[in-house]
Amino acid sequence: MSRYPTRAWRSFDPQRGGAAAAAPPPVLAAERTGLRVLGLDPGSRITGFGLIEWRDGRWCHVAHGCIAVPGAEALAVRVRLIFERLTELIAQHDPAEVAVERVFVNRNVDSALKLGQARGAALCAVPHGVTVFEYAPRAIKLALVGSGAAEKQQVAHMVRALLSLQERLAADAADALAVALCHAHSRPMARLAAAHGAAPNGSGTT
């Protein structure tokens, strides 16, 4: 004899069948109005930044741009300029969270080392108490376009569409806004994972 009154899963009642009813999924808290996320695309010559804010039930554009440092300057000077300008930018806009693209290891070791130092300067500019999240390039493309192999033009197009921007975006600024949007879209899942004691996809540090 069957353990349950019926074999049809559509009519299965967990209460009558002896199993405990599944707990309803937790209700995710709404984003706090005015919450700001800063996305960064660090580079040894150009560092892109993009700032978005939760307002009126959606993520809205606040600011974007590029921090360009003279390529002729010594690397130590460029790194210091990146740190100083990002420190000023963060003090001006006061983001609650910062999202950074995870380092892509280039075959050129020298370029990878320079990128790592520029990224380190950017991270050092983030004040204590502001959480930093990192996302792999493929994860960012997947979050915005639906494909981890998307082209830069496709990512930039989706950034403009999601933020209702008409102007053309510089590549580094578009990438930075893409990082910010990737994190913004990942926040509900991160809260859900935290509610179940699981680690979120993006790694967060303070």
Image: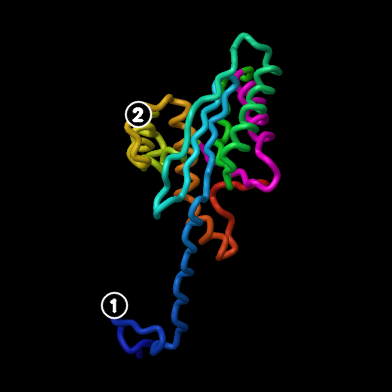
The tag on residue 167 is 2
* Local secondary structure at mark 2: loop
Q: Compared with residue 1, is residue 50 higher up or lower down, i.e. above or below?
A: above
> Which percent across, then down, holds residue 85?
62, 27
Judged left or right of residue 203, residue 76 is right
Classify 10 Å Cα crowding around label 1: few (below 14), some (14-19), many (20 and above): few
Mark 2 is on which residue type?
Glu
Magenta stretch bounds: 111-136
Q: Compared with residue 4, is residue 189 higher up or lower down, i.e. above or below?
A: above
What is the spatial separation of the Cα atoms under label 2 and label 1, in whole angstroms?
A: 51 Å
Asked whether disc 2 touches disc 1, contact meaning CB atoms under 8 Å apart, the reply is no
Colour mode?
rainbow
Q: Compared with residue 3, is residue 178 higher up or lower down, i.e. above or below?
A: above
> Which percent across, then down, holds residue 1?
35, 90
Judged left or right of residue 46, residue 17 is left
Which circle's residue, 2 or 1, is located before the other in the chain? 1
Q: Residue at x 39, y 90 (%)?
A: 16
Judged left or right of residue 38, residue 162 is left
> Which percent across, then down, holds residue 99?
55, 41
Mark 1 is on which residue type?
Arg
Closer to us: 132 or 70: 70
The tag on residue 66 is none
Judged left or right of residue 97, residue 156 is left
Corner quadrant of residue 5: bottom left
Closer to us: 116 or 125: 125
Closer to us: 9 or 195: 195
Query: Mark 1 highlights which residue?
Result: 10
